[in-house]
Amino acid sequence: MNKSIKISSVFPKHLFWDVKMEQLDAETDQGLIIPRALFMTDELSFVQDIEKLELIYSSDEIIDTLKTTKERISNKVCEMVAHRYHIPVFRRYSN
C-alpha cells in the first residue's frame, strides 16, 4: 500500500467529476476515494478496479469504508468485495 500515489494517475477522472483530482489526498480523502473507485464497477471490471485500490489501501480500509460510506454503492459491489476478501457478505441496502 502506498498512500503517496497520486489519485489522478490511478483512477479515471470521470469518477471524481465534482472535485479537483489533483487535490485529493489518499489519507484524508479515503472516504471519498474508495467508494468512488468502485461506484461504476461491475463483474467484468471489478478485479481491475479493486486492484487499483489495493495499491493504496489495505483490505480492512476498503471494507470498513464501504460498510460506512454514504456514497451509493450497490449491494452487488459489496458482495464482490466480501467474496474477494473471504468475509461474510454485507449489504448497503436491504431488499
Image (cartoon, rainbow, N blue to C red):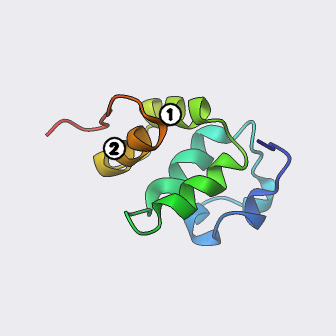
Residue 63 - label: 1
Left or right, 52 with respect to 66, comes to right
User: Does label 1 or label 2 sit earlier along the sequence?
Assistant: 1
Residue placed at 45% from the left, 30% from the top?
A: 68
Residue 36 - label: none
Q: CA distance from mark 1 to mark 2?
A: 11 Å
Image quadrant where one finds the N terminus: top right
Query: Residue 23 at x, y = what percent?
Result: 79, 54
Residue placed at 68% from the left, 40% from the top?
A: 57
Left or right, 69 with respect to 57, comes to left
Closest to the observer, 86 or 29: 86
Closest to the observer, 81 or 34: 81
- Badge 2: how crowded within 10 Å, few (<14), some, or many (20+)? some
Residue placed at 59% from the left, 35% from the top?
A: 59
Q: Secondary structure at mark 2?
A: helix
Query: Residue 64 at x, y = what percent?
Result: 52, 29
Closest to the observer, 24 or 92: 92
Image mark count: 2
Residue 79 - label: 2
- Badge 1: how crowded within 10 Å, few (<14), some, or many (20+)? some
